[in-house]
Amino acid sequence: MFGTPGGTVWVYAQVYEYEIQMVKPGQRVELTATAYPGRKFHGVVKSLDPILSAETRSLRARIEVPNPEGLLTLQMYVDANILANIGRKLALPESALVDTGTRKIVFIDLGNGRLEPREVQVGRQAEGYYEVLSGVKEGEKVVTSANFLIDSESKLKAISPQPEKKPEHQHQH
């Protein structure tokens, strides 16, 4: 971060390789600093470096941020959330997703108290939602309530591939 207190500061943010296609000059940015909990700062992407860093696999974005109170100072760390329009996509609320570590599961409400656990593939995460790549179709109802309790271990075991049982070894006399 570089700038003069009370004026404008430059924030330099790393944009990872998989995000580069979504970041363009002119996009709005929301910034937060641990030094000021609950406070948001707003800026605009002014430019992106033309060369990818081999070490971090990222590009540096230069963000201009008004700093009228002089709160943002040199060498301060901030989190930058660049607001990008990803278009209209089928999405799931974060609360609907059960991440087992190896798979991502949602519970489809089939009606009459019946639920179907289903593996899904998700893409980008934005504003409390995950983009759906596969596993759920538009119009299907997913369980999203935080008050909905499931014995998830037994439910997930029921849908997990079970190892084949080896036949017991028998001795003939």
Image: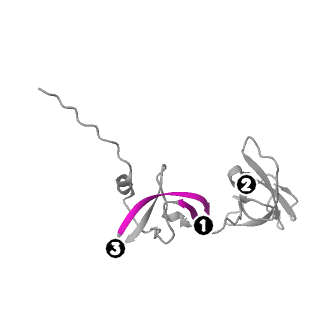
The quarter of the picture where the N terminus appears is: bottom right
Q: Residue at x 88, y 59 (%)?
A: 4
Disc 1 to disc 3, how far (Cα)?
Answer: 29 Å
Q: Which residue is mark 2?
A: 20
Secondary structure of the residue carrying tag 3 is loop
Q: Quadrant of residue 44?
A: bottom right
Q: How is the image coloured?
A: one colour
Q: Which residue is mark 1?
A: 89
Q: Which residues are magenta?
A: 114-133
Front tag of 2 and 1: 1
Q: Main secondary structure of the magenta part?
A: strand
Q: Earlier in the sequence, mark 3 or mark 2?
A: 2
Give whichever of 149, 112 is nearer the camera: 112
Mark drawn on residue 168: none
Mark 1: secondary structure: loop
Residue at point 38% right, 48% down? 161
Residue shown at 35%/46% (left/top)? 162
Q: Quadrant of the C terminus?
A: top left
Expressed as whole percent of the image width and height from the top left, the position of residue 157 reads 36, 52
Q: Amino acid at mark 2?
A: Ile
The Cα atoms of the two marked residues, 3 and 2, are separated by 45 Å
